[in-house]
Amino acid sequence: MPSEGIKVVAENRKAFHDYFIEDRVEAGIVLTGTEIKSIRNGRVNLKDSYARLNDGEVWVYQMHISPYEQGNRFNHDPLRPRKLLLHRTEINKLVGKIQLQGLTLIPIKIYLKRGMAKVELAVGQGKKNYDKRQALAEREGKRDIERALKDRNKA
């Protein structure tokens, strides 16, 4: 993938803890001049962000892009809703999954691809608390096994 010129700017690791990820889609973002400069500096936070369909368009909410230091009066609102650029067929596929199956759109990562800002959207279903505990227990078990194997190989 490095040959494509992809530079990951921010990831939403909490999404993998809170959701079962089923499908992923790449989308462009409509940005202002100071927003893309802040993204190139890596000043983006996807922690509480989510995407929603409005009037046949996909919008991302609560994605925090910090104001650009040299932006003065031309700076943007850090939490403003931003339109995502998707083909009509992709939007229709997402509409079917979201409305019929009750799934959610979550931005997983934002990256620069050949100089253009892109968002990777995931279609996911929310986990219950017992699912989260089970995933943590599995991770702990794997970690213990790896630790035991490592200690055994040292001896």
Image: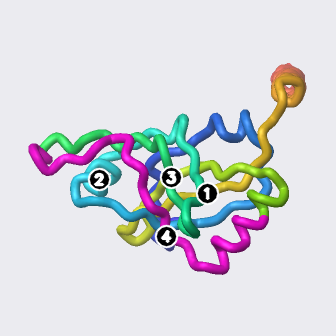
Amino acid under disc 2: Glu
Vertical relation: 148 (above or below) 78: above
Disc 4 target residue: 85
Would residue 26 appear left or right of 21 to someone viewing this image? left
The amino acid type found where label 4 is placed reads: Leu
Q: Earlier in the sequence, mark 4 or mark 2?
A: 2
Residue 23 shown left or right of residue 71 in the figure: right
Label 4, label 1: how far apart the Cα atoms are: 11 Å
Q: Position of residue 104 (x, y in %)?
A: 71, 49
N-terminal label among 2 and 3: 2
Instruction: Name the quadrant of the N terminus.
Output: bottom right
**Residue at the (74%, 57%) spot, across then down:** 98
Q: Is residue 69 left or right of residue 38?
A: left
The part of the chain drawn in magenta is 71-96
Observer-nearest of 86 and 36: 86
**Residue at (61% x, 57% y) in the render:** 121
Q: Which residue is labeled 3 in the image?
A: 60
Between label 4 and label 2, give the one nearer the viewer.
Answer: 4
Rendered location of residue 9, percent (x, y): 44, 49
